[in-house]
């Protein structure tokens, strides 16, 4: 037997329970992974509360982790016993051990620690698809990044700066503004004190930004649209403030023939080639210290309810990991 966090019903952090589970042996194409560190992501909250479906209950939340391969199923050739591997977007991560499709695993170089690996996969692959696929950022572009001091935000800002973009980060405090500026933000906007769209226009000489990367959702939708230049792209990739309400596409025309998309990482790692392309780019910039992964909070996996409370209260910066 081994331990895992399970939910028997959706709700607040109190529904997260530390329980015994039976992992079993890997089937065809699977491995059994002895995990060491799990990542914490806002998508975990969406699953816990029922905003995103999690399938039959009880269920094990969590979407990313790192561990050691300890058993191989039939036909597995892509990884070997003892390999140190990580993954993202695979529900069921909050566990000491698990079964997982070998095709979802990425080998982790020795230069990258377990905590860094657990913190970087989902968030880093998210930053990758936003910057390289959703709106391919070019040198000279101006972009707006919400939650710029958060896990995805800090990676996104650093990587965008590497690509030659001017990065405007939206944050909730002076402390978070300082952190964002130290990690790729050229300018910051304190959303509680400033009009976001108005400030963006000031910073871009009235033009607006090429892309807005918005993980907040309902509360920032209008400001995000109003911050864009003509033909700009709004990538609304999270709903921390709630889902965006239905709107008429006709509002996009007078604002400059804008584009709105609701991307998800699941689409961008749906094939092995897509996964490897993103993971290889991510590992390269992290291993070579061009993008730093800030693990600013750690919690024992058994106490992950505390981590969920801190995340939802916006008390965290950078990445948070759950130690097993």
Image (cartoon, rainbow, N blue to C red):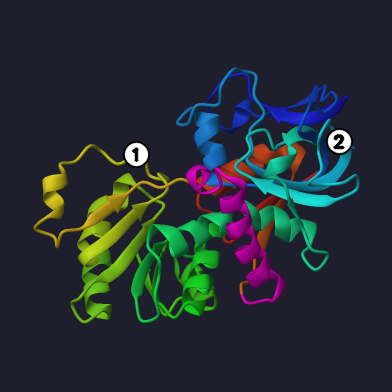
Identify the residue position indicated by label 1 in the image.
243
Identify which residue, 170 or 90, lies in the foreground.
Answer: 90
The stretch of residues the image draws in magenta is: 265-290
Q: Main secondary structure of the magenta part?
A: helix
Pick the residue in front: 248 or 170: 248
The residue wearing badge 2 is 72
Q: Residue at x 41, y 49 (%)?
A: 237
Rendered residue at 51%/60% (across/down): 127
State the image coordinates of residue 173 (x, y, percent, origin top left): 44, 66
Q: Quadrant of the N terminus?
A: top right
- Where residue 178 appears, x then y in whole percent? 50, 75
> Crowding at label 1, few (<14), some or many (≥20) Cα neighbours within 10 Å?
some
Q: What residue do we see at 43% from left, 59% from top?
A: 133
In reply to whether residue 93 is colored magenta, the answer given is no
Name above or below for residue 74 compared with residue 108: above
Q: Tell me if residue 267 comes above or below residue 212 in the rendering.
A: above
Q: Are marks 2 and 1 in contact (CB under 8 Å)?
A: no
Q: Quadrant of residue 98 in the image?
A: top right
The reply to whether residue 195 is in sight is no
* Disc ID at residue 215: none
Distance from the alpha carbon under mark 2 to that under mark 1: 41 Å
Percent from the top left, x then y, of residue 136? 40, 66
Of residues 192 and 230, which is closer to you in this image? 230
Whether residue 114 is visible here, answered yes or no, is: yes
Left or right, 295 with reference to 245 = right
Quick check: 224 left or right of 124? left
The first of marks 2 and 1 along the sequence is 2
Q: How far across and down, in percent of the image, does residue 274 sit?
A: 56, 52
């Amino acid at each position: 037997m081994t331990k895992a966090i399970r939910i028997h019903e959706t709700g607040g952090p109190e529904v997260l329970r530390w329980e015994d589970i039976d992992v079993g042996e890997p089937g065809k194409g699977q491995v059994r992974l002895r995990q060491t560190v799990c990542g914490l992501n806002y998508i975990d909250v969406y699953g816990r509360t029922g905003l995103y479906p999690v399938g039959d209950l009880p269920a094990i939340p969590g979407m990313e982790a790192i561990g050691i391969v300890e058993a191989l199923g039939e036909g597995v050739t892509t990884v070997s016993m003892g390999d140190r591997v990580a993954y993202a977007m695979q529900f069921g991560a909050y566990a000491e051990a698990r079964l997982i499709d070998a095709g979802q695993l990425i080998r982790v170089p020795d230069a990258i620690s377990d905590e860094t690996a657990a913190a970087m996969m989902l968030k880093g692959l998210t930053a990758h698809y936003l910057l390289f696929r959703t709106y391919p950022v070019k040198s000279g572009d101006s972009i707006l990044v919400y939650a710029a001091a958060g896990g995805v935000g800090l990676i996104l800002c650093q990587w965008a700066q590497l690509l030659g973009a001017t990065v405007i980060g939206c944050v909730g405090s002076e402390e978070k503004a300082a952190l964002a500026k130290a990690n790729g933000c050229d300018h910051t906007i304190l959303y509680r004190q400033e009009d976001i769209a108005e400030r963006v226009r000031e910073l871009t000489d009235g033009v607006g930004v090429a892309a807005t990367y918005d993980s907040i959702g309902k509360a920032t939708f209008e400001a995000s649209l109003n911050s864009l230049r003509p033909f700009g792209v709004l990538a609304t990739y999270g709903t921390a403030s709630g889902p965006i309400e239905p709107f008429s596409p006709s509002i996009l025309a007078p604002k400059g023939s804008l584009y709105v998309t609701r991307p998800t990482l699941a689409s961008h790692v749906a094939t092995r080639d897509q996964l490897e392309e993103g993971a290889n780019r991510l590992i390269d910039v992290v291993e070579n210290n061009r993008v730093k992964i800030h693990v600013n909070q750690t919690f024992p996996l058994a106490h992950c309810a505390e981590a969920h409370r801190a995340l939802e209260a916006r008390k965290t910066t950078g990445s948070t990991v759950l130690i097993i």
